[in-house]
Amino acid sequence: MSISPLPQVMTEPMVRAALLEDLGRAGDITSEAVIPASLRANCDFVAREPGVVAGLDLARIAFNLIDPNLKFEPLVQDGDRAVAGLVLARVSGPARTLLAGERTALNFMCHLSGISSATASIADAIKHTKARVACTRKTIPGLRALQKYAVRLGGGSNHRFGLDDAVLIKDNHIAIFGDIAATIRHARANVGHMVKIEVEVDTLDQLERALTAAPDAILLDNMSPDMLRQAVALVGGRAITEASGRINPTTAVPIAETGVDLISVGWLTHSSKTLDIGLDHRTK
């Protein structure tokens, strides 16, 4: 499925803030001191390793905010799979502009492509099952929309975007309010009819009690594959089942094979390894 880039009205403020952070009070004093103002340059964004590309539009915005006349030419699309050595995009214009925007452009592309690539590694591993990999709210502050976009590019799904778009009753909610079923019923009575309700459980006993209140989804936390299989059978299709806890491309396979609908993975957004992408000067 083709995924459109995020609207520039959403992304430009993030790129602008990153540029301001990098340019500081005096701009790129190294390039100003070394590179003649009239000198032009051509550079290529090159993948140093295989992965799923993300963040091309943010790289373009980074350069164009400094110089709107700079030419940025993507050779692939976000979501495409790259091999090592593949040229992802070409950029040309005043050399000072290229050097001033280089790090910001690469920071976004390397980080987001790393998230997309990590997501794809799990999505690929479980594609023989019905399960989908989903991210969480464990995101870097200020970058949530971008990181969740990168997850979608890698073949994953998004969990809720914030505290305001779905109810997720976790262990502390239950500990404070009381009985798990009563907590679900109380939530149902106090939110709109369009709001989904999910509840976290970590034992089969909790699950059985939760099901009496008919939640829309069940978060099965830190359960073994055997326990997950029992949990899926207990739910019997009455709610969406989501597994979480210590999931990586290897452990995801037996978890997905239990029949759960979703596998949520927090580290995809908060600590995925960046994808190695470089900006190389091109002589022609």
Image (cartoon, helix red, strand yellow):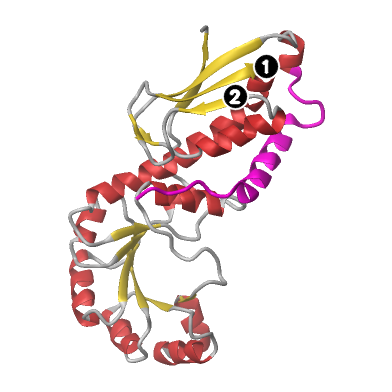
Crowding around mark 1 (Cα neighbors within 10 Å: few <14, some 14 to 19, many 20+) is: some
Q: Quadrant of residue 22?
A: top right
Closer to the camera, 277 or 1?
1
Task: Say which residue appears at 32% left-offset and 91% top-offset.
Answer: 212
Residue 196 percent across, percent down from the top left:
44, 78
Q: Which residue is mark 2?
A: 71
Closer to the camera, 223 or 186?
186
Left or right side of 181 for 225: left
In reply to whether residue 144 is colored magenta, the answer given is no
Outermost right residue = 25
- The answer to whether 263 is drawn above or below residue 10 in the figure is below
The amino acid sitting under disc 1 is Pro
Q: Secondary structure at mark 1?
A: strand
**Mark 1 vs mark 2, CA separation in Å:** 10 Å
Res 92 seen here: yes
The amino acid sitting under disc 2 is Lys
| Magenta-colored span | 1-29
Res 178 seen here: no
Closer to the camera, 24 or 154?
154
Left or right side of 95 for 206: left
- The answer to whether 82 is drawn above or below residue 253 in the figure is above
Q: Which one is in front in this view, the residue at disc 1 or the one at disc 2?
A: 2
Residue 87 percent across, percent down from the top left:
42, 23
Q: Which mark is residue 94?
A: 1
